[in-house]
Image: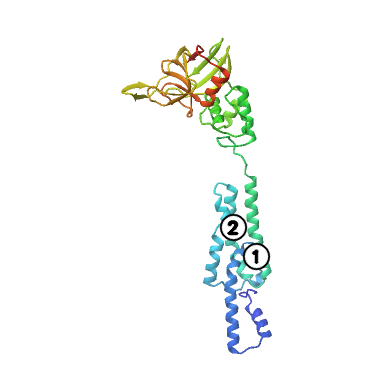
Amino acid sequence: MRAIHGRPTHGVGRAVGKRVIGTLGAVALTASLLSACGDEQEPQGSAAATSSPAPEESSAAPEPSADESAAEEPEASEPSAEGSADAGAEDDADDSTAAPDEGDAAGDDGANNDDEQTDEGDGAADGEEKPEDNDGDKDTKDEEPEEPDHIEYGEVSDRVGDLQQRLKDLGYFVTLVDNAYGGETQQAIFALQKAGGLYRDGVVGDATQRAADDGLVPQAQTSSGKVLEIDIDRQLVLAVEDGSVVKVINASSGNGATYDAKGATYTAYTPRGSFAVYREVNGMHSSSLELGDMWRPKFFTGGIAVHGSASVPAFPASHGCVRVSNSAMNWIWDTWGAPSGTPVVVY
């Protein structure tokens, strides 16, 4: 039904001309028309955002009633749902603030043009404005980068695979190039960051990526023979052959704290010096001090061993032994060797 606040006589004249009724019938018809205007007022509040400026001849149109203004105001000031849902995108935030400004500016014009807007025009306005905002949001989201600038735990992508292959080629302990940043890749990243003196967080930012691209590898301290080197300062284990680093493995040694075990107090200390593997256990071994289990340990002095563990953080955390990952310990046993008598140099 055509809105009638601007020129009410047009619609009433047509209705009376078509149907001549008694006094009671005319009153009923007028009441029904006024009721229809109230129903149409709310959708026009949303369409007003795209209305053109009112012509000068309609400037004398009556002001909307208080009830009608109240129905329009929330429509003009409320931001779109999609604009507020993505608080992190600056473009989306701009879209959500632009809509109220347009609605406030055009609200009165929309009321003045009620007599000239047909139902079809109102529908087009409603149908055009909201899809344009939605399309804008979609375009903004499409423009956002699909991948962050850094690589971190949990990412699955080709660039992770490229990084894994690069680390493997450099000698960092990586057994599988599968494009998935999991625990093994994290251990290798820790080792790379330790070798370069970088922040040990496992996140591959610009500095860590540059270290990989530049081929950063720690240098061996020995020059001959097959030696297991343990770098306490950088928390690394190096498998070295005749002065060349064959494998770089993330490690965690004694944290320097004191602890009690079986009624005695000890210090979590990893001694430095030149040693050799003198005992090995091919399987899970429980600490005689009841400090936990060690996977396939190779003891090199007293009760201190290089052994596998499910927990190898990027910092010193053990009671004095040197932890490496279980898979790295399997490599030392099954691929590299390090039998009894293998030199162990701790520095």
Residue 117 visible at all: no
Residue where numbered disc 2 is placed: 99
Res. 53 mark: 1
Above or below, comparing residue 19 to residue 281 in the picture: below
The total number of labels drawn is 2
In percent of width and height, residue 277 lies at: 48, 14
In the picture as drawn, the residue positioned furthest to the bottom comes out as: 22
292 or 318, nearer to the observer: 292
> What residue do we see at 57% from left, 24% from top?
173
Viewer-side residue, 242 vs 327? 327
Circle 1: is it few (<14), some (14-19), or many (20+) Cα within 10 Å? Answer: few
x and y percentages locating residue 16 in the rendered image: 65, 85
> Of 270 and 38, which appears nearest the observer?
270
For the residue pair 334 and 199, the one nearer the viewer reads as: 334
Disc 1 is placed on an element classified as loop
Residue type at tag 2: Ala
Q: Which mark is residue 75?
A: none
- Residue furthest top as drawn: 224
